[in-house]
Image (cartoon, rainbow, N blue to C red):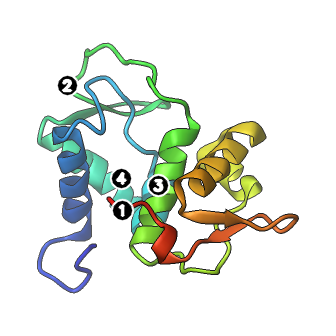
Amino acid sequence: MLDRDGPVPLYVQVAEVLGERIACGEFRVGEALPSETALEEEFGIGRTTARNAARELRRRGLAHTVRGEGTFVGPPGVPRVKPSRALYVPIAAAVARRIARGELRPGRPIPDAGTLMRHYGVARVTARQAVALLVRQGWAVATPPRGARVADPSSWPRDA
């Protein structure tokens, strides 16, 4: 959770969160970090704050940016790796984090496939797989034909 009224700038706080994720292995050397758009949605920040967070990671030597391609873990010149997990897995994880933080409340809709497609730049099947994973994990409940809604917290994964 970001401290929006504290003395530490938001971009530094976001960079710290991402640095912790790098340190714990959530992002490997050469792997792409979330896009500016994904950071905006996950943290509720503006584009400039997302850019400054990437700049802070570069300053700390944790990442490098390739113009037009994104920001990657590690120093410049490190070979970029393709994601080892399916694209829908980190999308579902980002939505699950929003649910766990209370941004998406029980009984309320989760982002639909169209929204996920636009936000993450993925195909409809990938967006649907992310929603299906959230349902399998217990974060969401399918409510055809209306999509899916945030599940009751009692059904959320225990390690959440």
Residue designated by label 3: 94
Image marks 2 and 1: residues in contact by CB distance under 8 Å:
no
Mark 1 lies on a secondary structure that is loop
Q: Amino acid at mark 1?
A: Arg
Q: CA distance from mark 3 to mark 4?
A: 19 Å
**Closer to the eye: label 4 or 1:** 1
Residue at position x 64%, y 67% in the image: 110
- The residue that mark 2 highlights is 75
Q: Residue at x 53, y 63 (%)?
A: 139
SS state under label 2: loop
**Can residue 123 be spotted in the picture?**
no
Q: Amino acid at mark 3?
A: Ala
Q: Rate crowding at label 4 as few (under 14), some (14 to 19) or many (20 or more) other CA atoms within 10 Å.
A: some
Q: Residues within 10 Å of mark 1 (few under 14, many from 20)?
A: few
Where residue 51 is drawn, which disc sits there?
Answer: 4
Name the residue furthest right: 145
